[in-house]
Every structure is written in structure tokens, then in C-alpha cells.
Image: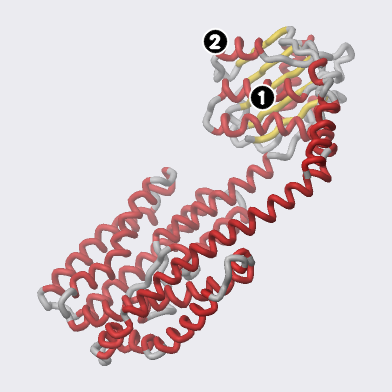
Amino acid sequence: MRRALTALLLSLITLTGGAAAAAAVTPEEVIVEDTAGVLDANTLLPALEDIEFREPTTVAVYTYNGPAGNEDGTVLNAEVLRFAREQHPEWLSGDGQKWADGLFIFALDPTGRWTGTYYGEDRKIPLSQQEDIREETNSLFAEANWTEGTIAAVEEAAKLINRPWYLSPAVILGAGAAVLAGLVSSITYVLVRWNRQRKNRRLLADADASYSSVTHDLDATEVNANTIPADSSYGARVLEEYRTFMVRYNTATELNNAAHALTDKDLKQRSSTTVLEQYADAAMELDGLDDVIADTNALLNKAPGWERAWDRQTGPLFEDLDLLDDQLEGRGAAEKDSATAHALRAFRQQAREQLAAASTALTEDRITPEQALDRIKASRTELSELLKHHAKTVIAAQTKSGAERELMQEELKKAAEPRRLHRDGYRPGIVDTAFPAYFYYSVGSFNSGIEHGTSSVESARSSESGSSSTGYGSSGGSFSGAGSSGRF
């Protein structure tokens, strides 16, 4: 391995040894035509004048406010050509069919959100590298940092224009591809196994903690189950879950034994993860169930400590109502002012008041524990329906096509799927256990779905905007200057 790395290093030194011979010259001239009025000349001009190219190059920057919502890249290309013909004919070749030699043009349309790069024939670079230049600006322009983004574009252009073949990443990487591939493969193999072992150990520790808790509470769980009123609708359903408790506990014990039979070497294997996940699922589900059994007994019998059991049932719903504040305020104006948003706000206040009233009525024995749990279930059902309706509003506001709508709908569907205990710390309550098929769309799941959906849509748009437009429109005639434009 050491000899291979030495050989690679010598090869790279040989290949790049001539790099110092490449000239480094500042622009012959910098021309800024900021018709959009978005650039800070005091910052821009000194920065551009200090950028070093490999050959004497004239740098031109042109900004203009194009049509909003423009989806056609040839609009910017045609505009740059029109401006050059009318205001800077020296930017064109003698026959007017190409850009002048020694020229680099960077164009920006902040309104239509397009950028373009154009090159004299002796300065042109491949289309993929033109896209690289524009990508340097995307994050800056997304935050309206027009001056910094323009500087970044010219700096990247200076690196790529007339770059010697021996500085091409493909050449440098190719020289040591075989050695690097072997090295990377070896390192990756070791890191993957080490990371898997670390995660498996953590998973085993979490599973053991739950299994130990269940084992310690076995007698108490049996006592609690034996005193749950079987004539209660909630009590009867929870008892149905308890009837298989010992069978599931015995299964968890077998999985515990299998998990602890794994050696440190075994913990590096993918197959071990499957065993540990099965153990964790079994132990954590039982740990959640014995808590529900204890809460069901305390609440339905109003035994000492029933208030804490009730708080554990209402707590998740109160948390969801609090999350609604951030969810509704964090959206765009059209979404915040929509009918579905107003419905959620009205429900938020109404639900808080109803839960508080239920707590008081339960304390004063004006309603039964079953009726109090029914109110939680009803509120959660109503919240789920309101979130479904609001999802349609958000999707309509944030998408532009059927394909984008499908992306967001798919992410919302994923977020609403049943959660695993050891994945996110979710612990079921009495309502969840009594009605396992009952669907509850939590605000947390909704927010996660919208966030991932928005990210998927933005990624799709970014992928589309990465495609370049190279034509100059019908007004360009036979003009065939090198260059392209793209969205940001």
C-alpha cells in the first residue's frame, strides 16, 4: 500500500509539475452594465479586477430585469445578444456571428432568475463546465446576494477558461484511479463495518433497557391488568392486548438470548442488525404496553396517580396543538390566510378549551374516564381531517405541476405511516392501544411530510434548472457564439 501511494504521489507531481508555467493575469478590461441596478460597484469592480485568468481576458457583466416567470432560457441569451449589438458591438467577432476573442460575459436576470455565460471562441469551455460556473452562484443568488454571486461566477470562470489538460480533474484522478479505488474500497469497508458495529451496540443497549424495565415490572403489570374493568370499552380492548403479553415476552426473551450470543465480530455484520431490530421492536413495544396497562388501570379506576395517567394521554395532543402555531406561521401568505389554516386555528383554541374542560369535569366526576378518552379520540380525529384538508392547500400553493403534486403527496403519505418505537421515541397511549387501526395524523408527521415534500420538489426543480439553454431565439439569426444560460 505504501509503495502504491508513493507511486501515485510521484505521478501526480509529474502531471502537475507544469502548473506553475501557466500564466496568471488580471483582466485586460472589466465592463459592468448593471441595468437591473442590483450590483454594488464599489465591491464588485475591485474584486473582478483582482481575479487572475490564464490568458488576457476581457470580463463583461450584464444585468437586466427580464419577464417574471420566464421558463425559456433563450430569452436571456437573445437579450444579451441584442444588448451587445446595440451597445457593445466590440463584444462581437468581425463577421458578427460569434463572440469576440478574449471575451467572457456573465449575464444575470434577477427577476426571471436566469444566469448566462458567454465566451469568445478562444475562451469557450464545455457545456458541463459552463453549468459548473452557474452552480457556484445558485446558493448566493437564492439569498439575493447578487454582487457576491457575480464575483463567485467570474472566479470560477477564471479557473476553467484555458485550463491546461494536465490540471483536468479527469486526468489527475485517472492517474491514480486503480490505487485510489483499492484504497477507498478498503477504507470504506472498514468504516462501514465499524459504523454498523457502533449502531448495533447502541441498538442493543436501548433494547436491553426496555427489556429490563419490562422484566422488572412483570408482577406489577399482572396486578394492573387484573384490576382493569373488563366492562369498559377501553379496558376490554387493552386487556385483549395483555392476553398475548406473556407470549410476546417469551419471544422477546428468546431474541434477548440471540442478541447477547452475538460477538463483537458478529456486530459488524448486516445480518446482526436484523436480529437486534427484531429484539428492539419486541422489547420496546412491550415496554410501551406495560405503561399503557398501568395508565389504563389507574385512569379507569381513578386510582392514586390517575391525574398523571390522564396527563400522559392529553400531553401528545397538547404538543400537537402547540406545533400548529409554528406550522401555520411558517408558511407563505396564501397558506397562512387560507380557509383551511383559519379552520386549524379555530380548532386549536377550541380543542385546548375542550381538553381543559374535560380535565375539570373528570376531576369533579361529571364525566367518566371513558367519556374523557372519547373526547381525546374525537379531537384527534378532527385534527387529522383538518390537516388532510390543509395539506391540499399547501400542495396547491407550493407546486406547479401534476408531477410536483405527486411528489409532495407521496412524502405526506410516507410521513403518515405507523411509526416504530425505536426509530423516533414514539410511545402509544390508551387510545392508540385500544384502537390500533385508528388513524391519527399528528402535526409532527404532517410537518415532516411537508418538509420532505418541499425538498423533493425543490430538488426536482434544481435538476430541471441545471439543463442549459444554448440558442439565441429567432432574433439571433445565424449567430452561433459559445455560451448558455440556466435557472437558479
Q: Is residue 65 left or right of residue 83?
A: left
Q: Is residue 415 above or below residue 280?
A: above
Q: Secondary structure at mark 2?
A: helix
Q: Earlier in the sequence, mark 2 or mark 1?
A: 2
Q: Is residue 98 left or right of residue 325?
A: right
Q: What is the three-letter code of the residue carrying label 2?
A: Asn
Q: Is residue 425 left or right of residue 467?
A: left
How many residues crowd mark 1 within 10 Å: few (<14), some (14–19), many (20+)? many
Residue 360 image-quadrant placement: bottom left
Q: Is residue 398 above or below residue 351?
A: above
- Most extreme residue toward the right, as rendered? 95
Q: Position of residue 249 (x, y in %)?
A: 43, 84
Residue at 50%, 75% (x, y): give it. 279
CA–CA distance in space, label 2 to label 1? 18 Å
Q: Which mark is residue 42?
A: 2
Residue 466 image-quadrant placement: top right
Residue at 39%, 63% (x, y): give it. 386
Q: Are marks 2 and 1 in contact (CB under 8 Å)?
A: no
Q: Is residue 80 above or below residue 411?
A: above
Residue at 24%, 82% (x, y): give it. 297
- Most extreme residue toward the top, as rendered? 28
Q: Which mark is residue 153?
A: 1
Q: How many discs mark residues in the rendered view?
A: 2
Q: What colour scheme has been applied to the protein in the rendered image?
A: secondary structure
Q: Which mark is residue 253?
A: none
